[in-house]
């Protein structure tokens, strides 16, 4: 399968040259594809050319919305279907400043964090760059959005199912294409990438010179504790991870955001102090995340009292921290929960 949105306007023009078709057709195809029209819907493009594109294996709609679930708080969860019938999910969160879409980067995940539903059945496959773009364009169209001023998706977080740095090339290609000025053009400043901490890929990402925000799932402050909940901690120690983040911070000059699940075992005062010492020398922010309980997860939520103490200790050490608003908990909005629910419903028939 070839996805039209994976090509730049320049590349499409070259493709038209090779087909001996006038170059302005490339502009028409590009624009329709950015508005997420199917090839059949590109009515201004001659039928012959549309048929040719289809014959050559092109599509402009690699992702379709199978279902939408609207939460009481306005959050919308999408169950997306891929052309090979695999399912992925995305979450649309409405904020005062705009609409943020959380996209998936893989079908399933092989990182195996104990609290997360996405990794329970392992990884099925990586998403192509165009399949990540497809989620953004499908959601934009769903909201009645267009391009430029009419764009409805303003922010993207790569925080859905999958580990973005385990699908490195496609993810970097996605970021470059979605932020290019010809396209829907979402500023890199408005894109966050969340990783469980694949240290060597963090160095590589720093060298790409992108303007995105790097978000890191920290979740524990000692190697021993981290290994119990995140498999990746066996491959890279906290010291390895922090060294990579220092490199990223120095190279990109952007503050690092840490995600920190609030569980019974990780919110002591000593944990808060260790966060302060680990992050010395870099500007960072801690995003405290209430656990969204999955049946398989062994983690218990931290009490409000302990959470408050933890927060106060962070503050005393000069670390900025906020609690992430819990959105969409009535619609299985956390990583992998919806796909899993849907797959198990199917297997009950
Ligand atoms: N693989 C990437 C991105 C996907 S997970 C990463 O690890 O960062 C995105 C965020 O959601 C991570 O911080 C993850 O730890 C968190 N998360 C996953 N399952 C959760 C759950 N059940 N409750 C709360 N947060 C969860």
Image (cartoon, rainbow, N blue to C red):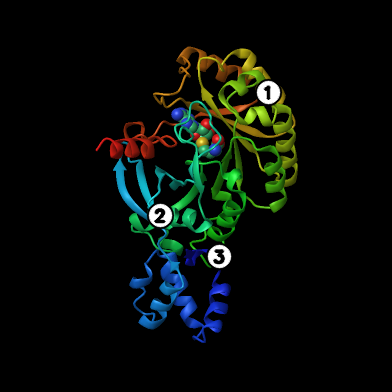
Locate residue 83, reporting x and y percent.
40, 57
Dot 3 corresponds to which residue? 181
Q: Give the Cα separation between the discs numbered 3 and 2.
A: 30 Å
Q: Give the Cα separation between the discs numbered 2 and 1.
A: 46 Å
Q: Is residue 98 positioned above or below 40 on the image?
A: above
Q: Is residue 281 positioned above or below 135 on the image?
A: above
Q: Is residue 39 positioned above or below 44 on the image?
A: above
Q: Which mark is residue 175?
A: none
Nearest the camera: 91 or 119? 119
**Residue at 69% across, 27% down:** 238
Dot 2 corresponds to which residue? 84
**Residue at 38% across, 40% down:** 339
**Residue at 66% across, 23% down:** 275
Would you call the spot at circle 2 few (<14 residues within 10 Å), some (14-19), or many (20 or more)? few
Q: Which mark is residue 276?
A: 1
Q: In the picture provided, is 226 more to the left or to the right than 305? A: right
């Amino acid at each position: 399968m070839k996805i039209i949105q994976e090509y730049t306007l320049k590349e499409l023009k070259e493709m038209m040259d090779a087909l001996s078709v006038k170059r302005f057709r490339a502009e028409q195809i590009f624009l329709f594809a950015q508005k997420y029209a199917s090839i059949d819907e590109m009515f201004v493009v001659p039928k012959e050319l549309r048929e040719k594109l289809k014959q050559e294996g092109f599509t402009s709609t690699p992702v379709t919305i199978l279902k939408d679930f609207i939460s009481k708080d306005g959050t919308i969860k999408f169950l997306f279907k891929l052309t090979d019938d695999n399912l992925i999910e995305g979450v649309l969160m409405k904020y005062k400043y705009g609409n943020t879409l959380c996209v998936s980067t893989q079908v399933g995940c092989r990182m195996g964090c104990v609290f997360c539903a996405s990794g329970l059945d392992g990884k099925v496959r990586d998403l192509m760059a165009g399949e990540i773009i497809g989620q953004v364009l499908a959601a934009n169209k769903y909201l009645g959005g267009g391009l430029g001023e009419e764009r409805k998706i303003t922010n993207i977080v790569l925080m859905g199912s999958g580990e973005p740095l385990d699908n490195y090339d496609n993810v970097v290609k996605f970021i470059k294409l979605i932020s290019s000025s010809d396209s829907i053009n979402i500023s890199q400043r408005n894109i966050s990438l969340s990783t469980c901490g694949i240290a060597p890929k963090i160095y590589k990402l720093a060298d790409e010179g992108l303007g995105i925000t790097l978000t890191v799932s920290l979740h524990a402050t000692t190697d021993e504790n981290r290994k119990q909940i995140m498999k990746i901690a066996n491959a890279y120690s906290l010291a390895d991870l922090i060294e990579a983040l220092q490199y990223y911070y120095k190279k990109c000059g952007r503050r690092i955001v840490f995600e920190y699940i609030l569980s019974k075992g990780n919110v002591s005062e000593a944990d808060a102090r260790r966060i302060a010492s680990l992050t010395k020398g870099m500007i960072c922010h801690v995003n405290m995340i209430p656990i969204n309980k999955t049946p398989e997860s062994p983690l218990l939520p931290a009490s409000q009292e302990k959470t408050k103490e933890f927060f106060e200790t962070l503050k005393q050490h000069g670390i900025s921290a906020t609690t992430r608003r819990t959105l969409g908990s009535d619609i299985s909005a956390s990583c992998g929960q919806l796909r899993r629910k849907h797959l198990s419903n199917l297997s009950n028939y």
